[in-house]
Image: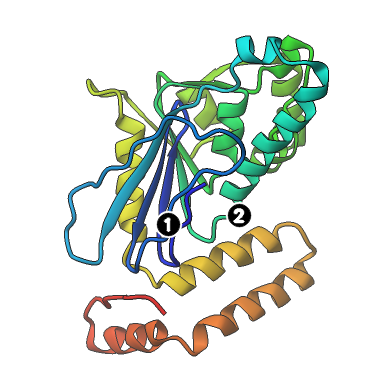
Amino acid sequence: MAAAAPGALGALRASRVRLVAACCARLGPAAWAGGPAPRRGYSSEVKTEDELRVRHLEEENRGADLKERAKMHSSEVGPFVSKIRAVINDIANLPVPTIAAIDGLALGGGLELALACDIRVAASSAKMGLVETKLAIIPGGGGTQRLPRAIGMSLAKELIFSARVLDGQEAKAVGLISHVLEQNQEGDAAYRKALDLAREFLPQGPVAMRVAKLAINQGMEVDLVTGLAIEEACYAQTISTKDRLEGLLAFKEKRPPRYKGE
């Protein structure tokens, strides 16, 4: 699980997962939790200014390794899935925006990983679905909870019961993803779109981004009155920040603010 400083942005690529952190402040240390570390590599994209950092954690993630799972004793399966669920929950709880970019397959755990992100984009040729019932099991990494919250209960039940696999266009039609793109020759159209979105988010105040995500996530789980109280508490956290004062000054002078953190 990669940890990023407030103000960072993340993108997860669900067939070949990339955790991209683009931040206006310092990047935190990155380490994987929840079992043996996957194959990973860190790299930097082109930086437009000193404060901009874009790094990614990359791994193959089409879902669980069924050959490995078949060799497990039944007593090992529960703890193994619990670790997967914990890692996916950690991604969902990152205090920064995350974007899942699906350029290939996102089946089972791969889609559950994408569902843990704030925003999902996919190539039209991508394939995604919760296919566990075909294997006589159910989604165990949060799929039964996050898919209904993303597309509604009835449709989520239909997709899980049928183990149906959707392409990018179909996923966009049901509201599973926000953007669908024609795949490019490099095979990373969705990932490039995710980076474009991340750069669009980047100029915003880092504290505001963090508490906005918190207010939305927590508010969706409660009634409106409680949700408004959560919003009020989150708003209060932005009042004393230098970012807010700089933003107001920049608006008054009609120039873009340059956020550097709290």
| Vertical relation: 247 (above or below) 122 | below
Res 175 visible: no
Q: Disc 2 designates what residue? A: 93
Q: Which residue is mark 1?
A: 29
Answer with the quarter of the image where residue 36 lies. top right
User: Which quadrant does the C terminus fall into?
Assistant: bottom left
Which residue does the image show at 32% across and 45% down from the upper left?
195
Drawn side of residue 41 relative to residue 148, left or right: left
Residue 130 image-quadrant placement: top right
Q: Residue at x 51, y 36 (%)?
A: 177
Instruction: Say which amino acid is labelled 1.
Output: Pro
As drawn, the label of residue 1 is: none
Measured as percent of width and height from the top left, residue 76 is found at 77, 24
**Rendered view: 184 above or below 258:** above
Q: Secondary structure at mark 1?
A: loop
Residue at screen point 82% across, 18% down? 74
Q: Is residue 245 left or right of residue 172?
A: left
Q: SS of the residue at dot 2?
A: loop
Nearer-the-camera pick, 179 or 163: 163
In the image, 81 versus 193, the foreground residue is 81
**Three-letter amino acid code of the residue under disc 2:** Asn
Q: Looking at the image, which residue sits at the far right?
A: 75
Q: Dots 1 and 2: beta carbons under 8 Å?
A: no
Residue 17: quadrant of the picture: top left
Distance between the alpha carbons at the discs numbered 1 and 2: 17 Å
